[in-house]
Image: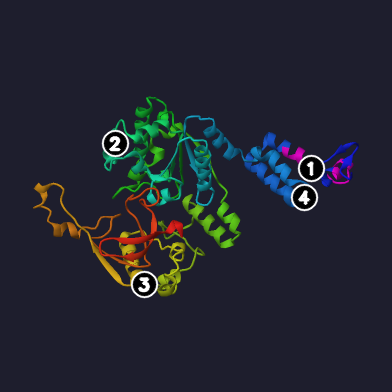
């Protein structure tokens, strides 16, 4: 037998060659990694492993990876082990876009649900919630009052004896994505509510809670608020922040996998902008955006560049889902949407909202005509024009988790009293 060396039959010819000393083994690589595990961080161990793969060509890299996997993924492992062991606590995962935050959350949810444990996935916005398996908005999950910002002792409106209360009491882990957008009183209200539900004085009632987000992005929106008001509303201004264990994801995996220099430049520019490192020009209120993209001379050119040949491309439902135009003001958003809708060759269908005053005594003070003229941010206008092929976003949770606040759809057919849509997530 060719695989037999000194009376021992090996599983493969390669193992037999190693036993005969005909091939180089990985002992030197193994010893190198063992030394690194003593003094180096998990990220440094990963970098060293990559150098070994690139420049020394180990004979069995898979075996080395399996042997040192846990040592090289310590940042992830520390957090997942905490969850696996059922430890309580309040954690915050700081992760800029593309660093693997969503993948990390999905891994936690899948691992716990596979064991039959209750893992609650929430997010501050409906759109962010749609990216999580079984995700719901924080306000929907915890019944957060709309006027919670003005409450001195914030708490959630969860009734005793309900199924929701039992789920929260039996939950194993709670995840709140994009938590940096939430007013600190929302997190404080959840803390107060969970303490009451779980009859525990521990933070979050002893429920392991993972908050995720990036403070470089949008902070809580305070209407006509000053800088001081916005800072006061941030999670870091909460008394709970001193109890938070912080973790960070720093490598942009999305850019690394694309190997695109422009994407890397864009990501680095965003990080510098968020860190306050971008050069200012003329005034501290302005930043330099040189070499940061292509400038459109007017809105028509912008629309043609982002949505070229929309009159024919709209029939491909994946096409509009691959592009977006962002604007800082609602008026600009409405103008852009109107111009794009006019470019669609399909028929316009007009739908009119029904507005009324809840308190009959105030009906005289607020006539229907006045209500119809009000445009509320985040709600549809009184007169809504729709076309087939037009992208749209749901503003209410109609049938969770398929159709919920933030779900993006494509209009398939417009009837007199209802609209047929295709969930863009299923395209």
Instruction: Name the secondary structure under disc 1.
Output: loop
Of the image marks 1 and 4, the number of the one nearer the N terminus: 1
Q: Residues within 10 Å of mark 4 (few under 14, many from 20)?
A: few
For the residues marked 4 and 3, what is the alpha-carbon distance in whole angstroms?
Answer: 56 Å
Specify the label residue 157 is tagged with.
2
| Residue 344: mark in rendering | 3
**Observer able to see residue 106:** yes
What is the residue that sits farthest to the front in this orientation? 1
Q: Is residue 368 above or below residue 46?
A: below
Q: Position of residue 21 (x, y in %)?
A: 88, 43
Residue that badge 1 annotates: 26
Provide the residue span drawn in magenta: 16-33
Ranked by sequence position, the earlier of labels 2 and 3 is 2
Q: Is residue 265 magenta?
A: no
Give percent across and percent down for residue 267.
53, 56
Q: Secondary structure at mark 2?
A: loop
Q: How far across and how far down the image is residue 355, in percent?
A: 18, 55
Earlier along the polypeptide chain: callout 4 or callout 2? 4
**Cα separation between marks 1 and 2:** 60 Å
Label 3: which secondary element? loop
CB under 8 Å between discs 4 and 3: no
Mark 2 burial class by Cα count in 10 Å: few <14, some 14-19, many 20+: few
Q: Mark 1 vs mark 3: which is more N-terminal? A: 1
Q: Work out whether residue 239 can be spotted.
A: no
Nearer the observer: mark 1 or 3; the answer is 3
Q: Name which of mark 1 and mark 2 comes first in the sequence.
A: 1
Cα–Cα span, label 4 and label 2: 60 Å
In the image, taking residue 368 as reference, residue 151 lies left or right, namely right
Query: Is there CB contact under 8 Å for labels 1 and 3?
Result: no
The alpha-carbon separation of the residues under discs 2 and 3 comes to: 44 Å
Q: Position of residue 120 (x, y in %)?
A: 43, 39
């Amino acid at each position: 037998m060719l695989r037999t060396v000194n009376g021992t039959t090996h599983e493969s010819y390669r193992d037999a060659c190693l036993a005969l000393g005909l091939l180089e083994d990985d002992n030197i690589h193994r010893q190198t990694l063992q030394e690194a595990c003593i003094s180096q961080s998990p990220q440094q161990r990963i970098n060293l492993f990559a150098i070994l793969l690139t420049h020394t060509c180990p004979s069995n890299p898979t075996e080395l990876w399996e042997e040192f996997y846990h040592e090289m993924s310590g940042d992830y492992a520390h957090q997942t082990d905490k969850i696996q062991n059922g430890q309580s606590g309040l954690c915050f995962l700081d992760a800029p876009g593309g660093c693997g935050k969503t993948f990390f959350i999905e891994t936690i949810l899948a691992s716990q649900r596979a064991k039959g444990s209750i893992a609650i996935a929430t997010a501050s916005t409906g759109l962010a919630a749609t990216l999580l398996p079984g995700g719901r908005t924080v306000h929907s999950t915890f019944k957060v009052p709309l006027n919670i910002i003005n409450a001195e002792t914030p708490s959630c409106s969860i009734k005793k004896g309900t199924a929701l209360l039992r789920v929260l009491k039996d939950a194993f882990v709670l995840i709140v994505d994009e938590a940096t957008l939430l007013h600190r009183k929302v997190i404080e209200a959840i803390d107060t509510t969970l303490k009451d539900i779980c009859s525990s004085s521990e933070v979050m009632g002893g429920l392991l809670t993972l908050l995720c987000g990036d403070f470089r992005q949008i902070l809580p929106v305070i209407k006509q608020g000053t800088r001081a008001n916005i800072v006061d509303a941030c999670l870091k201004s909460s008394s709970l922040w001193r109890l938070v264990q912080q973790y960070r994801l720093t490598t942009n995996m999305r850019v690394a996998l694309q190997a695109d220099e422009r994407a890397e430049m864009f990501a680095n520019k965003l990080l510098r902008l968020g860190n306050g490192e971008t050069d200012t020009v003329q005034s501290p209120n302005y930043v330099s955006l040189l070499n940061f993209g292509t400038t459109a001379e007017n809105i028509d050119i912008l629309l043609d560049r982002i949505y070229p040949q929309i009159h024919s491309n709209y029939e491909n439902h994946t096409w509009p889902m691959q592009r977006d135009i962002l604007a800082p003001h609602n008026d600009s958003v409405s103008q852009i949407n109107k111009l794009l809708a006019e470019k669609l060759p399909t028929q316009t269908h007009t739908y009119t909202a029904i507005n009324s005053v809840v308190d009959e005594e105030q009906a005289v003070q607020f006539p229907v005509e006045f209500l119809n003229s009000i445009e509320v941010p985040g709600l549809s206008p009184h007169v809504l024009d729709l076309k087939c092929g037009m992208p749209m976003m749901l503003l209410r949770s109609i049938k969770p988790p398929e159709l919920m606040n933030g779900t993006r759809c494509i209009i398939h057919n417009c009837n007199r009293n209802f609209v047929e849509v295709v969930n863009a997530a299923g395209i």
